Amino acid sequence: MVERQSTRKAYITVNAEKCKGCRYCIAVCSYQIIGVTNRLNQIGSIPVEVISTRAGLCTGCGTCALMCPDTAISVFSTEGEAALS
């Protein structure tokens, strides 16, 4: 019998108003699912966003959220539970 490996499916959200655009999260994301927006937020920074065409690659590792000095990124499992925020 062949056992299927379970893969952890997850997603992240970015609070664009808290993001100061340091781009640490972009640097550490192995799957390159985070990119820069083309607008300013309320504090005058250019925030990051999830690249919709790559969002499905997120494994929920949480590295992006851990690197974010502004706690602007939250990680969720596909069941909707907060994995890391």
Image (tube, rainbow, N blue to C red):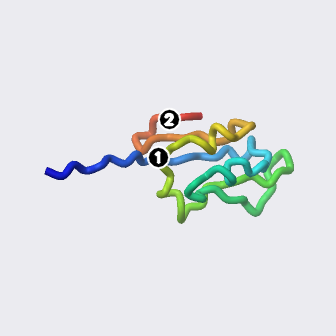
The dot on residue 10 is 1
Q: Is residue 1 left or right of residue 56?
A: left
Q: Could you tell me which residue is drawn at 74 percent across and 37 percent down?
A: 69
Depth check: give the residue in front, 21 or 80. 21
Q: CA distance from mark 2 to mark 1?
A: 9 Å
Q: Earlier in the sequence, mark 2 or mark 1?
A: 1
Q: Nearer the viewer, residue 37 or 69?
A: 69
- 28 vs 62: above or below: below
SS under mark 1:
strand
The amino acid type, in three-letter code, at marker 2 is: Ala
Q: Splitting the image into 4 quarters, where does residue 67 fall?
A: top right
Q: Verify CB contact (< 8 Å) between mark 2 and mark 1.
A: yes
Residue 42 at x, y percent in the picture: 82, 47
Taking 3 as reference, is 81 left or right?
A: right
Residue 45 image position (x, y, % from top left): 83, 51
Q: Which residue does the numbered mark 2 point to in the structure image?
A: 83
Residue type, mark 1 in image? Ala
SS for dot 2 = strand
Q: What residue is shown at x 75% (from left), y 45% (from top)?
A: 19
